[in-house]
Image (cartoon, coloured by chain):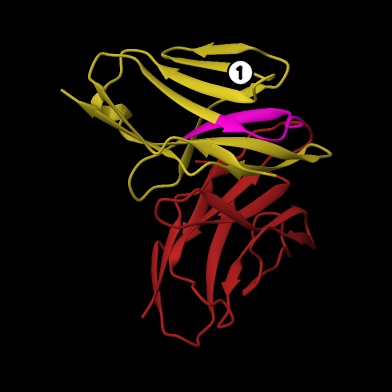
Amino acid sequence: DGGITQSPKYLFRKEGQNVTLSCEQNLNHDAMYWYRQDPGQGLRLIYYSQIVNDFQKGDIAEGYSVSREKKESFPLTVTSAQKNPTAFYLCASNPGQGRNTIYFGEGSWLTVV
Amino acid sequence: GEDVEQSLFLSVREGDSSVINCTYTDSSSTYLYWYKQEPGAGLQLLTYIFSNMDMKQDQRLTVLLNKKDKHLSLRIADTQTGDSAIYFCAESKGSGGYNKLIFGAGTRLAVHP
């Protein structure tokens, strides 16, 4: 089935460690996104990519990094520089080319212990 | 500014209609969206409306757009317990066919017998 797969679903990190969240899509979508969700708040954009080997910072990019080496994959690294990384992280994709529907994965919970 | 505002909570009786309201600030937004989020899950795209439309209906869902007042609403007819979730309004920003979405904080809909 086509879709967006995020892994792992739950991840625990010790302070000072970097972690990488995986996002894979087999929808042949051009654009991919990472959002962060905190309780009682909406989603905030971390990074987005419109094409392979290109990406742009969103509203809260500090302490995060991404890569887009393949069209299907857009991993997010949460670095030790991110002051408050505990959150729910959502990956999304958009077919682009004038089709304006953004689809989301099931999310990854990151907890710093 | 880029604020999208929603009321945080709505309680309705099963079988009644639910109306969830949203205001946005950017008059240049081309598309406005409604997403549904169930506990611990990703966001499910419910519907979207193009900014040159006033209304869109899709089965039990009716979206109304007042572009002059920058007001968007989602009406759910015959609300069921399975409709209990958080509903997010979002406005689009982008060009070249690639959007990024600005989200409200979400409205928690509780359906009771």
Q: Which residues are magenta?
A: B23-35
**What amino acid type is highlighted by mark number 1?**
Leu
- Considering only vertical position in the picture, is B11 above or below A34? above
User: Chain A appears in which tint?
Assistant: red
Q: Where in the figure is residue B49, as x and y percent of width and height?
A: 63, 22
| In magenta segment, residue A20 | no
In the displayed structure image, the side of residue A50 where residue B32 appears, left or right: left
Residue at the disc numbered 1: B65
Nearer the observer, B49 or B13: B13
Whole-percent x, y for residue A46 in the image: 63, 60
Question: Chain B in the picture: what colour?
Answer: yellow
Query: In the figure, A68 relative to B31: above or below?
Result: below
What is the residue that sits farthest to the right in this orientation?
Answer: B96
At x 36%, y 81%, the residue is A113
Please, what secondary structure does the residue beneath circle 1 have?
strand
User: What's the residue at 35%, 51% (across, down)?
Assistant: B40
Q: Is residue B46 above or below residue A57?
A: above
Q: Position of residue B2 (x, y in %)?
A: 67, 44
Task: Give the farthest residue toward the left.
Answer: B113
Question: Which quarter of the figure has residue A60?
Answer: bottom right
Above or below residue A35? Residue B90 is above
